[in-house]
Structure formats: C-alpha cells, structure tokens
Amino acid sequence: MHEIVDVTFELKTYEYSEPFRIANNVENKANNIEVRVYLKDGTIGIGEASSSYRVNGEKVPALFALQDTVKEMIAGEDVGNYRRIFDIMDGFSRTAPSVKAAVQYATLDALGVVMGIPVYQILGGSKSKIHTDKTIGIDTIDVMVEKARKTFDEGFKTLKIKIGENLKEDIKKMVAISEATPGASYIVDANQGYTAKMAIQFAQSVYAQNVNVAVFEQPIMWNDLDGLKLLRYNSPFPIAADESAKTRHDVYTLIRNECVDFVNIKLMKSGLSDALSIVELAKTTNIGLMIGCMGESSVGINQSVHFAAGTGAFAYHDLDSHMMLKEEFRGKFKQEGDALIPNV
Ligand SMILES: [Mg+2]
C-alpha cells in the first residue's frame, strides 16, 4: 500500500537576491534537485538536494544521472520501513550525500502524509519551535556593520558572520559589528580561510576586545586535524567543525582526536541517517551541535527545520538560505521573525 512506485528528480534553479560571498567563494545561484517519491496509493513525498562541489565534491549533472539508479534501488520498499531505505541510501554517503538527504527526507515526508503527522513528530517531536540566525556575507566593513545592525534590529539575535579572507580586517570587522549590535551573539565562520596560527590570533584578539563569539566555525582546512586540536586548546571560544564533519565517521574521528567543541550538522553533507548518528555521538561525548545549510530553498530548509525540531538537539540553527534566494515559499513550516515553526 505504502510502497514506492516511482522516483523523480527535477532541476530547480534559484537566484540569490545578491551575490553571497564567503572565504574564497561567491555564489550567484543555487542549482537544486527536487526529489519526489511516489507511493502506490498516490501519496507524494518531497525532498531537495542542494549540492556542494566545494564541500562534497558533488556536480549537479552527475547527481541528476542517479535518478534511475535510485529508483531501481528503492522501488518496492514500503516507506513505513524507512530504515531500509535509509540503509540503501547510505551507499551514496561519499558520492552524493545531498541526494541521499533528499531521498531519505522525501521518504519520511511521504510517511508523514500517510500517517497524518508532521515529519518532526516522526523524528521525536522534541521542540515545536526553533530560532535561526541570519548570515552576513563577506563585504566591506561598512556594509557588513550596516547589514548586521539591520538584521539584529529585525529580531535575529544570533548573527552568522563570514570572515576568512584578511585577518587584520576581520578582527576590525568583528569589533565594529560587536559595537553596533550590543547583546547579539555571533557564529563566526572563516570557511577554512585561515591557518591555525591565524585562527588563534583572531580568537585571542577579538576576545581581548570583548567580542562575544558563541562559536568559531571551521577556521582552518578540513583535513588539518592537528591544527584544529591546537586551535581548540588555544581559543577562548568553542571551535566548530563544518567542512571537516560530513559523515558519522568524520565526526567520530574529530571527537576521538579532541579536535572540536561543536559540530555543524548539515543534512546536505550527512543525509538524515548520518545526522541522526552524529546527534547521538555528540550527546554521548558532550559535544555541542548546530545545524546549517547549503543553498536550499524553503523546500530544502523545511527538511532541516523538521529534523532540528524533531531531535531538539541543536544549540544554534543556521537555516537561512531560503531567505537569501528569490523563491516562492513552499515549506511545511511557518516563519515568525527568527522563529521557524513546523506545521502540525
Ligand atoms: Mg560553515
């Protein structure tokens, strides 16, 4: 009755309202793949893959070519046995994690429709509301300060600040932003732009100037585990892994080697199955969690809203990409200021 009979991929291109700049990268548009699973009874489940070549090594045409393979692998499975579908999609953890995420979510979306409950309740129903930050991309100091002030005034209490291209300027930017937005907390993301020595200098310098950094995210290269450990023990702020933390195995290695205080889970890096494992790993080892995004539209952000509310596992939510894209809102959640509320 609730078995999958078809799977379709559709390319969806979304333009950013303005170019989004991070360390050594600019995005003008997001090429996402909308995934639909069709059940025998006509139920449709929807997911979205927002791939990343920079982080995952994914290219859209290669992902798109997986449509028939994925269909062949999961057709006939009942969405009620969703763990079987999760396990099948785990085969794509290294090669197509965003597609894995979209198919796994579409499976739960269909199951939710069948059961008549929202996905966040299938995942545990831990919270009925979460709060997101909003991101300030790299720009001149004046523009970043002005955007930070405006965003804080709009009600976003946590600001995500992109840095990592110029150490001295970055320190000045953080101090100026902090002075312009008293009471805000900051997730500072250098997207691998620094060396460990530079990152230590940044952290110690802004700390001495009374900047309240809640999380200092991926300052150095993803594979520099020694550097991360050195930084972690020389930074007054918690250090988070993002690009270093894709699969459950990556996170296990980071924790075992004492490299991180925080992990930034993204469904597009891990899918739902690895994200669930990472949640338990982090709980077991007292590591903090945040949840982030790539270039998802509201269809893709919807996945993370339900995942985050369902598991209730995250201290910080960085689920703002849909606010940066030109799109018509299609999420199964409501947005009130910085609050994201999954539909019941
Ligand atoms: Mg990041």
Image (cartoon, rainbow, N blue to C red):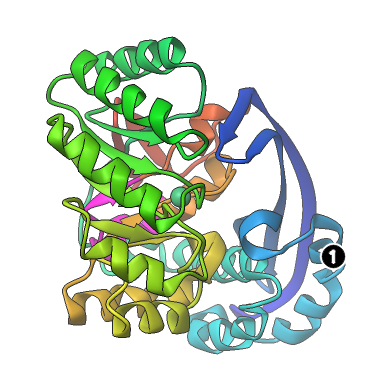
The one of 332 and 159 positioned closer to us in this rendering:
159
Up-down relation of residue 155 to residue 73 (above or below)? above
The segment highlighted magenta reads: 305-317
The one of 22 and 13 positioned closer to us in this rendering:
22
Q: Position of residue 169 (x, y in %)?
A: 42, 26
Name the residue: 39% across, 48% down: 198
| Direction from residue 50 to residue 163 in the image, left or right | left
| Direction from residue 181 to residue 166 in the image, left or right | right
Quadrant including the N terminus: bottom right
Residue picked out by circle 1: 62
| Direction from residue 269 to residue 225 in the image, left or right | left
Q: Position of residue 54 (x, y in %)?
A: 66, 55
The one of 140 and 318 positioned closer to us in this rendering:
140
Instruction: Inspect the magenta stretch and tell me whether residue 313 lies in it.
Output: yes
Q: Dot 1: few (<14), some (14–19), or many (≥20) neighbours within 10 Å?
A: few
Name the residue: 76% across, 77% down: 70
Question: Which quadrant would residue 304 be assigned to in this image?
Answer: bottom left
Up-down relation of residue 127 to residue 88 (above or below)? above
Amino acid type, label 1: Ala
Up-down relation of residue 129 to residue 87 (above or below)? above
